[in-house]
Image (spheres, rainbow, N blue to C red):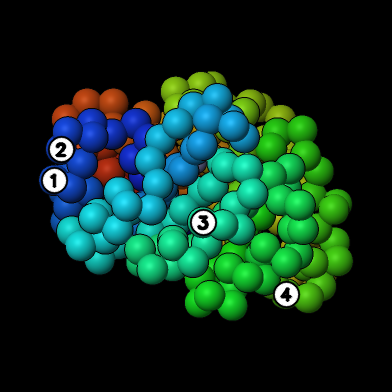
Amino acid sequence: MTAILSPSILAADFSCLADDVQRLEKAGINDLHLDVMDGHFVDNITFGVDVIKHLRAKTKMNFDAHLMVENPDKFLSGLKNAGVNSVTVHVEACRHLYHTVEMINKLGMQGGVVLNPATDFASLKYMAQDNIIKKVLIMSVEPGYGGQSYLPMSTQKIKDLANWRDENGYEFIIQVDGGINLNNIKTVVEAGAGDIVIGSAMFKNRELEKNAADFKNVLGI
Ligand code: DX5
Ligand code: ZN
């Protein structure tokens, strides 16, 4: 059983962010999940392009930006210049979703779509046919805050999405975000998720190497 582990720095101690990211990189983590929030699409505010740009100079990890902002289009070229590799946008935040995902791809990043817990993947039917969606992120909590509990219905949603993808020969990866811990990560990977975001369970204490190793051990990777 294999999957990408994507620590979310939302739960990190920002006073030592670069050090902690480098510790995770040395522990064999290759992907970093960056939750950009604007206080409008969600209540919370986090960080933007400038913080990402400075972090880019400290690590070679893949940078995956999860945009919880209104009108994400205006941030895309800045994110590209800051060294971001993939960007996911919420269905509800985009006025013209197809155009936004296409723009991410044209900038040379991997474009993806985020589904809130109540959002069905049915609306992706036509976009998926055009093969522009590289990733579908299933939110397994409501977006905005770390430390929430995994919504159990998410497991069936992952399975349904994976079946739909495979039946149609689509190739997007399924990412899951919210409430993932050592007890449920295997379930979401078995359901079909290939990229797992881990916030508070990765940064819950200062033992980052042990936390990363524990997740790898559970998956046998
Ligand atoms: C929530 C964010 C998540 C968050 C997950 O809106 O998108 O990436 O960091 O945190 P945990 O793993 O604590 O639920
Ligand atoms: Zn996220």
Q: Distance between the residues labelled 1 and 2?
A: 6 Å
Q: Nearer the viewer, residue 85 or 78?
A: 78
Nearest to N terminus: mark 4 or mark 3: 3
Disc 2 element: helix
- Can residue 15 be seen here? yes
The reply, left or right, for residue 100 in relation to residue 197 is right
Q: Which amino acid type is marked by label 1? A: Asp
Q: Which of 117 and 66 is in front in this view?
A: 66
Q: How far apart are marks 4 and 3 (CA)?
A: 23 Å
Nearest to N terminus: mark 3 or mark 1: 1
Nearest to N terminus: mark 4 or mark 1: 1
Classify mark 3 as within 8 Å of ligand 2 or not, answering yes or no.
no
Q: Mark 2 points at which residue?
A: 16
The reply, left or right, for residue 39 in relation to residue 192 is left
Disc 1 element: helix
Q: Quadrant of residue 7?
A: top left
